[in-house]
Image: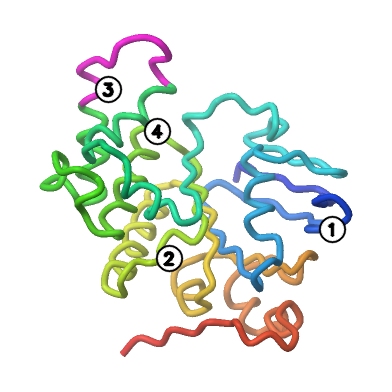
Amino acid sequence: MTTVVDVEDVTFSYGNTVALEDISLSIETGDFLGLIGPNGSGKTTLLHLIIGLHQPDSGTIQLFGEPATEFEDGQRLGYVAQRSTDRGGSMPVTIREAVLMGRFAHVGHGRLGSEDHAIVDQAIERVGITELANRPISAVSGGQRQRAFIARALASEADLLALDEPTVGVDADSREEFYGLLDELNQQGITIILIEHDVDVLTTHVSKVACINRQLYHHGDTVSFIESDALSEAYGKESGILHHHHP
């Protein structure tokens, strides 16, 4: 197995507030890692550190074997930010045009060619929204919009998807379909990091769990996570753990 992400003794603070302390974990090719923890526990901060948006105060992060903040092979990384479905609703573009943006890292200032358009069409088909390709992205549901963002990452030929609470504001049926899509992409070899509050979603779909609240309380497979005390230790008395049982 090839290591995609290597986090070693990472600490990060916002001013005098410590957000993460001595975090170490690795993500291998083909992993489907779920990041879970209370609100304000540092999940999004850790994801931002992994993809190079922040630099750790101490410790190191390697992304595909390079320092994350120096990683320039952007097409290998697909990032869907928190509440992107809300922001995407105001984009004055069609779904196909939004997905085309995923090819820009490959062509630079050059023109998109027939091969680029074919890759875009394949990505749109892969996430199951071909019939919506010419609709304005503002005119589709949150779940369909989220599929468009995944297609954009696929069009960039990403090896790693980093998703920050991708189904916030998405209805239950669309959530189930979306996670089914992630399962398929992971089975096809794409490595996924997912921030999610729903414990049942995590234990149903991901292969590994990292449970954090400033510190790392667990990093391992879902069975060992379920059997551990990591949730109660990380959440303490907080009642924000979400279980979503399906009939």
**Residue that label 1 marks:** 17
Between the C-alphas of marks 3 and 1, the distance is 45 Å
Q: Secondary structure at mark 2?
A: loop
Placement of 110 over or under 154, stated as above or below: above
Q: Residue at x 35, y 26 (%)?
A: 103
Tell me residue 11's x, y (percent).
Answer: 84, 51
Q: Mark 3 or mark 1, which has the lower sequence index?
A: 1
**Residue that label 2 marks:** 168
**Residue that label 3 marks:** 116
Count of labels in the image: 4
Q: Residues within 10 Å of mark 1 (few under 14, many from 20)?
A: few
Q: Residues within 10 Å of mark 2 (few under 14, many from 20)?
A: some
Q: Secondary structure at mark 3?
A: helix
Between the C-alphas of marks 3 and 4, the distance is 11 Å
The amino acid marked with disc number 2 is Val
Between the C-alphas of marks 4 and 1, the distance is 37 Å
